[in-house]
Amino acid sequence: MRTSFLTFVIAVIMTTATFAQTFTLKSKELGGQLTNKHYLNGMGYTGENKSPELYWENAPEGTKSFAVTMYDLDAPTGSGFWHWVVFNIPANVTELKSDAGNISSKLMPAQAIQSNTDMGTPGYAGAAPNEGPAHRYLITVYALNKTLDLNKNATPAYVGFNMFFSTIEKASIIVYGKKK
């Protein structure tokens, strides 16, 4: 009897673990490639400078806020390039609409803070890949166990340092962009 009960308990635990949901980041508009909509409008680019629509599912237990970043892994800087850094997105928010990274669009939740990008200004800075192979843009959502005590003047590195100690889990997608 005891063995049967123990077997049943183990089976239930294994079944639950098998069906555990994965924290996932998705976009209905990206499809693996940035479009002109997401490119910079300036520096020789004629893009629309609109941040992509993003949504995430299955946030881990204990999430108090989210952060979203977009980073060019292949920028010719020796250290990549931060195109978007937003944090203190409320835990009940599971999506960002297209162009939410535009400071004047009012599409970002009021509590969220868009800090400086590597352009030196807050908000979304569109993709601007140089000539050559396509650049990889890493977009990540972080589930944090607290809100960050930072302001919009925080550098991407300082935000990342603070997120490191508060991240419960993260989910990423990579999209590509090439100079047209």
Image (tube, rainbow, N blue to C red):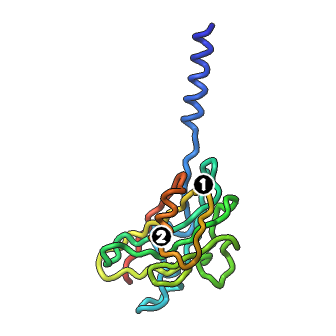
Q: Which mark is residue 16?
A: none
Could you tell me residue 86's position as x and y percent?
A: 57, 71
Q: Few, some or many C-alpha atoms within 10 Å of disc 1 (few <14, some 14-19, many ≥20)?
A: many
Using the rendered view, name the quadrant where residue 19 is placed: top right
Q: Quadrant of the C terminus?
A: bottom left
Q: Residue furthest top?
A: 1
**In the visual, does 37 lie left or right of 58?**
left
Residue at image location 47% in from the left, 61% down from the top: 173
Residue that numbered label 2 is attached to = 158
> Which amino acid type corresponds to the residue marked 2 in the rendered image?
Tyr
Residue at image location 61% in from the left, 26% down from the top: 12
In the rendered image, the vertical position of residue 173 relative to residue 78, given as above or below: above
Q: Few, some or many C-alpha atoms within 10 Å of disc 2 (few <14, some 14-19, many ≥20)?
A: few
Foreground pick, 163 / 15 = 163
Q: Quadrant of the N terminus?
A: top right
Q: Which mark is residue 145?
A: 1
Foreground pick, 68 / 158 = 158
Could you tell me residue 23's position as x and y percent?
A: 56, 51
Residue at image location 34% in from the left, 72% down from the top: 79
